[in-house]
Amino acid sequence: MLKPLGDRVILQASEEEEQTVGGIVLASNAQEKPTTGKVISVGAGRVLDNGDSVAPSVKEGDTVMFDKYAGTQVTYDGADYLVLHEKDIVAIVE
């Protein structure tokens, strides 16, 4: 499995089928990018200038909302993931 470094987080973005009011299903390239996902793996945390470490605010299994164009998409073992910095996560969905 992938193990993120520093303050990075690996997410599996939620794939939701977007449908219009008229019932037309939009092609995936015409849909908005997903902004929610499930945390798959979390790095050790951010290191401050003085050497202290700040633990991440999220944990594996959390469902989170993130900035629309944040992160880098990667494919590993046939699955698509999003790797982003913890600062790009805006909320934990409860």
Image (cartoon, helix red, strand yellow):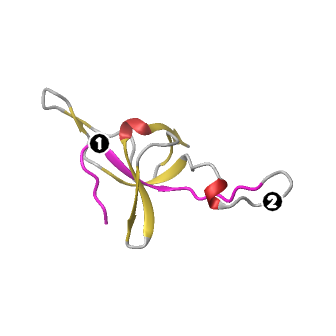
Q: Secondary structure at mark 1?
A: loop
Point out which mark residue 22 bears: none
Q: Amino acid at mark 2?
A: Ile
Which residue is outermost to the bottom? 78
Q: Secondary structure at mark 2?
A: loop
Q: Is residue 41 left or right of residue 89?
A: left
Horizontal and vertical percent position of residue 16: 64, 57
Is most of the magenta stretch helix, strand or loop?
A: loop
In space, the residues marked 2 and 1 are separated at their CA atoms by 40 Å
Q: Is residue 41 left or right of residue 61?
A: left
Point out which mark residue 24 bears: 2
Horizontal and vertical percent position of residue 17: 68, 59
Label 2 CA crowd tier, 10 Å (few <14, some 14–19, many 20+) = few
Do the residues under discs 2 and 1 have CB atoms within 8 angstroms?
A: no
Residue at image x 76%, y 56%? 19
Q: Quick one: 30 or 41, which is closer to the camera?
A: 30
Q: Is residue 30 left or right of residue 71?
A: right
Which residue is outermost to the top? 50
Q: Which residues are magenta?
A: 1-19
Q: Quadrant of residue 27?
A: bottom right
Q: Amino acid at mark 1?
A: Asp
Residue at image x 44%, y 68%? 79
Write down the residue under mark 1: 7
